[in-house]
Amino acid sequence: GAGVSQSPSNKVTEKGKDVELRCDPISGHTALYWYRQSLGQGLEFLIYFQGNSAPDKSGLPSDRFSAERTGGSVSTLTIQRTQQEDSAVYLCASSLEWGVGKTQYFGPGTRLLVL
Amino acid sequence: QKEVEQDPGPLSVPEGAIVSLNCTYSNSAFQYFMWYRQYSRKGPELLMYTYSSGNKEDGRFTAQVDKSSKYISLFIRDSQPSDSATYLCAMSARAAGNKLTFGGGTRVLVKP
């Protein structure tokens, strides 16, 4: 069956531009997560969704970052006025439901480079 | 200091050797412990999942958790070149639900 998919695979942008990253979770998975993986910081939690709502936005690095999920499926992570320190791999994961111990399945990531 | 510490490696071993990986952590609330494997330019995939202290074995993989020492380990027996990857430990606390805190990852290279 289809796993978590993310697009684009790679994105190169200029400092100050806005970018949108897309995540398609596994069909039927109600929980969706965004992480960021960078050389200096490892894998960091950004935000999660239960259905279409995001109860915990504490991991978002600044107010330039926002995310939404529609129809309980596709999610978009938006970074406004990108900075060079935003360069990283952005990973999306989904799980059948929210709750401790529920297995998270990761997508391949979007590699973002801000010049 | 990070909540979860993991030696970045690289750890190079000959084929057939035992690979030993570990993480230390500071948050005593962590109860759920996972090991993920990540190949280059791929997303992490779950290898092992353990709740609280103890050992768990799955094929060539053994995970150990020592909550008293805040120390977890992963052992890979009879290592193969296909085991060459980055291994990430992750953990979560009941109060945090499914929000995972990851170690930085250890890069492993198994030489034929």
Image (cartoon, rainbow, N blue to C red):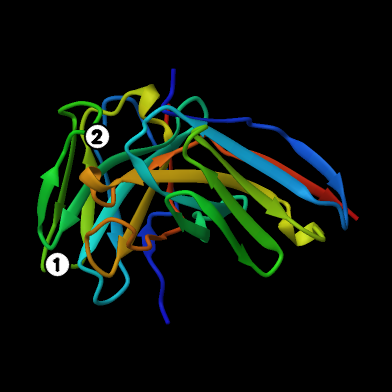
Q: State the image coordinates of residue B109 (x, y, percent, origin top left).
A: 77, 46
The residue that appears at 37% across and 30% down in the rendered structure is B27
Q: Quadrant of the C terminus of chain A?
A: top left
Report the residue marked by disc 1. Answer: A72
* Horizontal relation, residue B59 to residue A21: left or right: right
| B62 vs A78: above or below | below
Q: What amino acid type should be assigned to the residue bearing mark 1?
A: Gly
Relative depth, front residue between A17 and A49: A49
Q: Amino acid at mark 2?
A: Gly
Q: CA distance from mark 1 to mark 2?
A: 21 Å
Q: Is A13 in front, or is B14?
A: B14
Precedes in sequence: disc 1 or disc 2? 2
How many residues crowd mark 2 within 10 Å: few (<14), some (14–19), many (20+)?
Answer: some
Q: Is residue B14 left or right of residue B7?
A: right
In the picture of the structure, the residue carrying the numbered disc 2 is: A59
Instruction: Locate residue A97 relative to residue B53 in the image: left or right.
Output: left
- Where on the picture, by quarter, is residue A79? top left
Chain hosting mark 2:
A
Q: State the residue lying farthest toward the top.
A: B1
